[in-house]
Image (tube, rainbow, N blue to C red):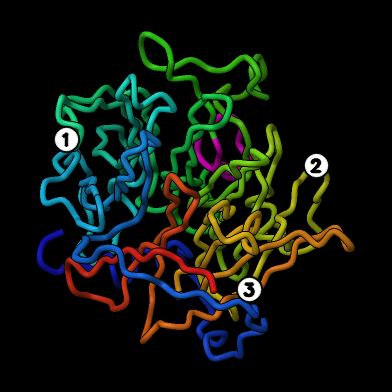
Amino acid sequence: MKNNFALLLSLFFAFISCSFNSDNANKTEKESSFTNALSLKLIASNLEGPIGMAVPNDGSKRLFVIEQEGKIRIIFNGQLLPVPFLDVSSKLDHLNNTYSEKGLLGLAFHPQYKTVGKFYIYYSAPTSTKGMDNKSVIAEYTVSSNKDIANTAGKIILEIEEPESNHNGGQLAFGPDGYLYIGVGDGGGAGDKHGTIGNGQNLNTLLGKILRIDVDVPKGYSVPNENPFVNRNAKPEIYAYGLRNPWRFSFDKKTNRIFCGDVGQNDWEEVNVIEKGKNYGWRIMEGKHCYEPSQNCNTAGLTLPIDEYDHTTGISVIGGYVYNGTNKEMQGKYIFGDWKGKIFMLLKSAAENKWERRIFTIKNLKGELYINSFGEDENGELYVLGQESLGPKKAGKIFMIQFE
């Protein structure tokens, strides 16, 4: 984590875990560019590993950015405030100098943040459990009397033991129902080999799932009675399962649908619409294709992705947002990307009743762009978090998407 913090080299490249076929790297992009290009307006720079963004919806117009090494930074009126909103770097498990998928990974503000001052973070902490690499922690914090500084004492509400260092997920988001949704990876390693059926298919572990909990209780959390696996032989926190490494999900503000990018293993990246109780297939399926067994797999009861692409197009999907900003042409389109600097949109074809993916041309992009995450502000405008070059510390940047 010191001077050679090379998250920028392989933070998300590692999300594909293994087996990216280098022979695919030189193949021609299959998709034609969308006729409407976009530009990226630089909002802030000199950030260290920016991998997430959230806003409190308190009318302040502040952008809160997650730095993987443990800090939450505030951007206000185009300026990066010098003092972090919160610094939990001392609580984190060791982050490898070469790359790490651990760290401070998620942030969500309580729906009534303006009055209750509560927010929630997801981070990787050391564990004392034998055979485990680290543990994912979801903790509650509060803002201090200074609106730009949080109180340093937090309250842990949930811990999840992680057998490997990768596939930690980390997304937090409050749904329109007021519950906290949590994206958790399959526990890491390649091919979800933990247990006889893999963690993604195992309903007795929280790994490889989208969880839903109620944090508006005096202590810890409670499980909503409407959760699909309550009073069954399963973890009642589970909302949906069969996921490998859900790297960013979000709610469409108009339809309330949950869109989720799930990072693939060897060949396929996918986007899912997450619904209560559904099984999204991993490790039986990778995208719409058999994974284990490699052929003639049983797809009964599985929900397949609304979109997939292979590694001739990209190598690690980055989930985004349905656009609900001021550009009327783009409203209702799901905007997402790939770590290798590509930005896509999905739109529903009414005639064929299927989703169509198109790729944008980024007009003002010079050189490489490595996309770590997307963000959304109070007005529904979207942002790209990443870097234009690999290697140097403090190379992270945030851009506002401007559709043309």
Badge 1 or badge 2: first in the primary sequence: 1
Q: Quadrant of residue 257?
A: top right
Which dot, 3 or 1, sits closer to the camera?
1
**Is the N terminus in the top left, top right, bottom left or bottom right quadrant?**
bottom left
**Tag of residue 158:** none
In contact (CB < 8 Å): disc 1 and disc 2: no
Which dot, 2 or 3, sits closer to the camera?
3
Q: In this rendering, would 393 be left or right of 379?
A: left
Question: At x 58% / y 50%, what residue is drawn?
Answer: 260
In contact (CB < 8 Å): disc 2 and disc 3: no
**Tag of residue 149:** 1
**Is the C terminus in the top left, top right, bottom left or bottom right quadrant?**
bottom right
User: Disc 3 marks which amino acid?
Assistant: Asp
User: Circle 3 sits on which residue?
Assistant: 310
User: Disc 1 marks which amino acid?
Assistant: Ile
The magenta-colored residue range is 195-210
Badge 2 or badge 3: first in the primary sequence: 2
Q: In this rendering, would 145 be left or right of 315?
A: left
Report x, y in % for residue 239. 61, 31
Element on which disc 1 rests: loop
* In the depicted structure, whether residue 291 falls above or below residue 275: below
Q: Which of these two is toward me, 62 or 111?
A: 62
Magenta span includes 203: yes
Question: At x 33% / y 36%, what residue is drawn?
Answer: 121
Question: At x 50% / y 66%, what residue is drawn?
Answer: 316
Q: In this rendering, would 13 be left or right of 140?
A: right
Separation (CA) of disc 2 from disc 3: 24 Å
Element on which disc 3 rests: strand
Separation (CA) of disc 3 from disc 1: 43 Å
User: Circle 2 sits on which residue?
Assistant: 301
Q: Which of these two is toward me, 306 or 20?
A: 306
